[in-house]
Image (cartoon, helix red, strand yellow):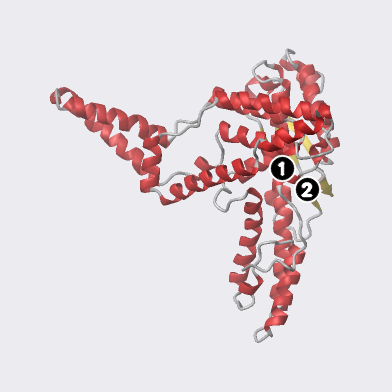
């Protein structure tokens, strides 16, 4: 049994974030982008779109070193083509005393953020074109800032853990009484704000490398527990980025852009699709080969070889396959977060009506989407790849957990309160 008595209870769950109370940030981004819809590409530069966007972001995040790139005025061929955020966190990992951070309670970056340099890349066509609405692009921008929030918060906690580890190594001595060792580890856990550290397990360990692994695992498990699952952490950063945008009031527009992104770009031609297509054609060709062997047999052999290659690749799926959730899962999670907001008993009648209307819009999106599953693919993955099997099972458990945690009773009770 884990000893949690030494840690102050701190709620870090994404469901308890408070900075969504005022959606002004989202509205100002949306209004700015709307002003540039239908304009010419050169207008973005002449009317200083990036300066205005930077000003809004800096004001609502407290970031000081922030820049937006959309391409070069004189070279259309060098336009930015994807929405993403770049930062210099890799060069800051070795810092022992981090001078900035991010609070999931307030939604602000804190401390000396001048050292945190960020560049937001925005495709010009997404701004002036009509495929994405101003609200959808604003939601996408908030999602990217959410990535930065997650990385900064995680780095700050990682550095706290490292500092606590240094103190532990200095104070531990061979032959110390168990009570003294427990006191050292408890103090370190408090300093690092670790909730999942097993003091009883640590008390009998002398190897610094083993202690380091246990502390690091505790940090990761804290984040995993905030999502409710130990295995489903591969999409953790995307989840947090989505929730940042939702908490800034961009939930329905984030769901809308997720659907459009999947419709426009679709899933890449993955190993699973290769297995599905080649496998089906191979079976069909093999049947036909029994009738007209001289003509179809070479084709059957080729397709069978392709199928085998596909299965082999399925044995070793890349990590990139597990980074993103499909649009249906993302929108379901967005809906759950908006539903949880109805638990606030101080909501006015107008706020309840506004939230329920947003939920109805998300329900419409959910009905239009289908889960991208294939029995043939899943069978092969579960049969030949234990990692993929565990991941699929963990995702299934996670989705069931969330469905239980967020149910429509909250919504019904909220509506009844204001009637």
Tell which circle, 1 or 2, labels the residue nearer the N-terminal end: 2
Q: Cβ–Cβ below 8 Å for labels 1 and 2?
A: yes
In this image, 237 relative to 391: left or right?
Answer: right
SS at badge 1: helix
Q: Is residue 77 above or below residue 194?
A: above
Q: Residue beneath label 1, please? A: 148
Q: Nearer the viewer, residue 235 or 347?
A: 347
x, y (%) of residue 294? 13, 24
Work out which quarter of the rendered image holds the C terminus and state it: top right
Closer to the camera in the image, 409 or 333:
409
Point 82% across, 19% down: residue: 47
- Relative to 178, is 303 on the left or the right? left
315 versus 41 height, above or below:
below
Residue annotated with mark 2 = 102
Question: Is residue 231 in sight in this rendering?
Answer: yes
Dot label at residue 364? none
Density class for disc 2 (Cα within 10 Å; few <14, some 14-19, many ≥20) is: many
Q: Position of residue 32 (x, y in %)?
A: 80, 22
Query: CA–CA distance between discs 1 and 2?
Result: 9 Å
Q: Which residue appears at 71% of the width and 34% of the height?
A: 411
Give the residue at x 79% y 59%.
Answer: 97
Q: Position of residue 414 (x, y in %)?
A: 76, 34
Instruction: From the viewer's side, name the closer residue of 195 and 206.
Output: 195
Q: Quadrant of residue 199?
A: bottom right
Judging depth in this view, the residue of 88 and 187 nearest the camera is 187
What is the x, y in percent for residue 342? 75, 36
The residue under the point 73% across, 75% down is 184
Number of residue marks: 2
Classify 10 Å Cα crowding around label 1: few (below 14), some (14-19), many (20 and above): many
Q: Is residue 100 above or below residue 60?
A: below
* SS type, badge 2: strand
Q: Is residue 310 left or right of residue 177?
A: left
């Amino acid at each position: 049994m884990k000893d949690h008595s030494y840690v102050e209870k701190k709620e870090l769950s994404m469901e308890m974030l408070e900075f969504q109370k005022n959606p002004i940030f989202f509205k100002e981004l949306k209004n700015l982008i709307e002003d540039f819809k239908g304009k010419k590409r050169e207008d973005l530069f002449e009317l200083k779109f990036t300066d205005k966007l930077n000003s809004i972001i800096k004001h609502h995040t407290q970031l000081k070193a922030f820049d937006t790139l959309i391409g070069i005025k004189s070279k259309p061929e060098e336009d930015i083509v994807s929405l993403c955020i770049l930062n210099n966190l890799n060069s800051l990992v070795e810092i022992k005393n981090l001078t900035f951070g991010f609070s999931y309670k307030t939604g602000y970056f804190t401390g000396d953020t001048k050292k945190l340099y960020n560049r937001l890349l925005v495709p010009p066509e997404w701004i002036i074109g009509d495929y994405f609405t101003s609200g959808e692009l604003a939601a996408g921008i908030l999602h990217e800032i959410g990535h930065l929030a997650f990385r900064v918060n995680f780095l700050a906690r990682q550095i706290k853990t490292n500092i606590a580890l240094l103190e532990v190594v200095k104070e531990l001595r061979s032959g110390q009484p168990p009570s003294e060792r427990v006191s050292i580890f408890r103090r370190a856990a408090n300093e690092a704000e670790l909730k999942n550290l097993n003091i009883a397990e640590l008390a009998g360990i002398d190897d610094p490398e083993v202690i380091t692994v246990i502390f690091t695992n505790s940090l990761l498990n804290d984040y995993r527990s905030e999502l409710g699952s130990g295995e489903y952490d591969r999409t953790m950063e995307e989840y947090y980025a989505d929730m940042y945008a939702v908490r800034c009031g961009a939930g329905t527009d984030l769901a809308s852009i997720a659907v459009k992104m999947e419709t426009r770009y679709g899933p890449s031609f993955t190993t699973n699709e290769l297995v599905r297509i080649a496998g089906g054609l191979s079976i069909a060709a093999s049947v036909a080969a029994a009738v007209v062997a001289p003509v179809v047999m070479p084709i059957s052999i080729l397709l069978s070889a392709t199928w085998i290659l596909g299965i082999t690749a399925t044995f070793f799926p890349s990590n990139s396959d597990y980074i993103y959730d499909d649009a249906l899962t993302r929108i379901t999670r967005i809906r759950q977060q908006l539903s949880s907001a109805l638990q606030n008993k101080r909501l006015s009648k107008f706020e309840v009506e506004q939230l329920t209307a947003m939920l109805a819009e998300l329900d419409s999106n959910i009905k239009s989407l289908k889960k991208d599953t294939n029995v043939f693919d899943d069978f092969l993955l579960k049969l030949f790849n234990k990692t993929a099997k565990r991941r699929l099972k963990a995702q299934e458990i996670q989705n069931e957990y969330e469905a239980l945690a967020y149910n429509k009773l909250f919504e019904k009770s909220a509506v009844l309160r204001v009637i």
